[in-house]
Image: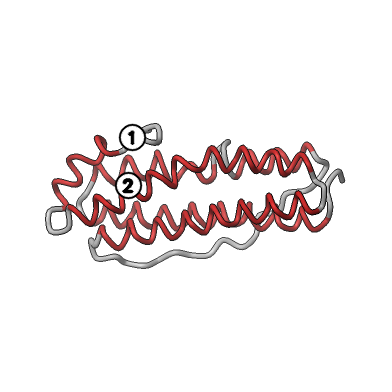
Amino acid sequence: MLISEETLDALNLLLGQFFTHNSEADNFAYNLAMAGYPQISDIYHHSFAHFFVGDEMADGLSNLMDMLDSRAVRKVNNAHEEDYQGNLTAIFADNVIMCEKCRNSILNVIELAELNQDVEVKLYCEELLMKFMPYYKQARIWSQFAQRYEGDFKSFDIHFEDITTYIPIIK
């Protein structure tokens, strides 16, 4: 193994968090779809929720661990079942909170990797953080617009693609 045990444990926790964030984001997308906002649900689900388990996040992190002769372990994935009853303001506020947790978790791994002199992990996670930051910014923008469109979420649905500017739109 080419990294410290402590850093490996932190990476495995981060990996588990990415899958948990995907589960939480999927729940947001399912709530959006059930509330009758197909444009928002489709863009959010494919462009945002899937990001957490793709090459940039979970898959990339497990590949790094493999390159460092370390075994990735998927930690327990928490279930997310909250019914938001069509409250897009609450969904997007919780999405920002989720992104804040993700950002802080990545920063914690960077700090720990530096402390343990696990240079490759530190450098990788710094790049990972920079790849994540547009998603965090987009989450904050969506939350602001959800507040502005409160009471007229159908218009928010119509304009959602136009205000999705920091991340690639995948349909």
Above-or-below relation of 114 to 161: below
Is residue 21 or residue 74 the one in the foreground?
Answer: 21
- Is 121 placed left or right of 108 in the picture? right
Quick check: 79 above or below 22?
below
Q: In the image, 144: left or right of 149?
A: right
Rendered position, 50 above or below 19: above
Total of numbered circles in the picture?
2
- Residue 33 location, x and y as percent? 27, 51
The circle drawn on residue 141 is 2
Residue 65 falls in which quadrant of the image? Answer: top right
Q: Residue at x 60, y 45 (%)?
A: 58
Residue type at mark 1: give it.
Answer: Thr
| Residue 9, x across and y down, in percent | 75, 58
Task: Please tell me which residue is depicted at 19% across the width and 47% down the height of the picture.
Answer: 156
In the depicted view, which residue is nearer to us: 111 or 96? 111
Of the two numbered discs 2 and 1 on the same chain, state the one appearing first in sequence.
2
How dense is the environment of label 1, judged by Cα within 10 Å: few (below 14), some, or many (20 and up)? some
| Furthest-right residue in this view | 1
Q: Amino acid at mark 2?
A: Ile
User: What separation in Å lies between label 2 and label 1 (alpha carbons)?
Assistant: 9 Å
Residue located 44% across and 47% down the image = 136
Badge 2 marks a residue whose secondary structure is: helix
Q: Residue at x 30, y 46 (%)?
A: 41
Contact flag, marks 2 and 1 (Cβ < 8 Å): yes
Residue 37 x/y as whole percent: 22, 49
Provide the secondary structure element on which disc 1 rests: loop
- Pointer 1: what residue? 165
